């Protein structure tokens, strides 16, 4: 997975940062189980994949779909897509913590 930060701004509250990120997942690449220290709101620009989120049924995501993942909630890429996927993501996360950590 490659992540390109498109914009970054402090807030919405002290100790937090908001990031707009373009993530690319190459075809047939599985994304390991991980968490983020804040909310992940995403829109799939291209491709598709399975999205298992702890405590929720696994969803099949495709271009044009949106999803959100609560803070510190383990999730993964599930079954890899057959084509490259591009995702536009807004993260609102605690400042100074890694954007993603293994779960």
Image (spheres, rainbow, N blue to C red):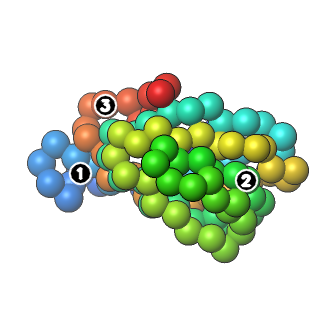
User: As displayed, is residue 64 above or below residue 77?
Assistant: below
Q: Nearer the viewer, residue 67 or 15?
A: 67
Sort mark 2 into few (<14), some (14-19) or many (20+) by Cα contacts within 10 Å: many
Question: Residue at horizontal 59%, vertical 47%?
Answer: 52
Q: Give left or right: position of 39 versus 16.
A: right
3, 68: nearer the viewer: 68
Q: Is residue 26 visible?
A: no
Q: Position of residue 32 (x, y in %)?
A: 62, 31
User: Which residue is located at x 64 percent, y 59 percent?
Assistant: 59
- Look at the image and tell me whether residue 84 can be seen: yes
Residue ID for mark 2: 49
Residue displayed at 23% across by 51% down = 10
Q: CA distance from mark 3 to mark 1?
A: 14 Å
Q: Are marks 3 and 1 in contact (CB under 8 Å)?
A: no
Label 1 Cα crowd, 10 Å radius (few <14 / some 14-19 / many 20+)? some
**Tag 1's secondary structure?**
strand
User: Can you give x and y, in whole percent of width and height, for residue 69 in the image?
Assistant: 44, 54
Question: Residue 75 got which mark?
Answer: none
Residue 97 x %, y % = 31, 31
Q: Name the front one of labels 3 and 2.
A: 2
Closest to the observer: 57 or 90?
57
Q: Which residue is mark 3?
A: 97
Q: Residue furthest right?
A: 82
Q: Nearer the viewer, mark 3 or mark 1?
A: 3
Instruction: Give me the C-alpha separation between circle 2 and circle 1.
Output: 31 Å
């Amino acid at each position: 997975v490659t992540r390109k930060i498109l914009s970054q701004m402090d807030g919405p509250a002290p100790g937090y940062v908001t990031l707009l990120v373009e993530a690319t997942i190459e075809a047939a690449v599985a994304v390991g189980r991980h968490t983020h220290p804040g909310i992940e709101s995403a829109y799939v620009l291209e491709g598709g994949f399975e999205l298992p989120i702890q405590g929720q049924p696994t969803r099949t995501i495709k271009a044009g779909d949106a999803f959100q993942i609560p803070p510190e909630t383990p999730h993964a890429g599930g079954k890899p897509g057959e084509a490259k996927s591009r995702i536009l993501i807004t993260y609102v996360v605690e400042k100074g913590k890694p954007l993603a950590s293994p779960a």
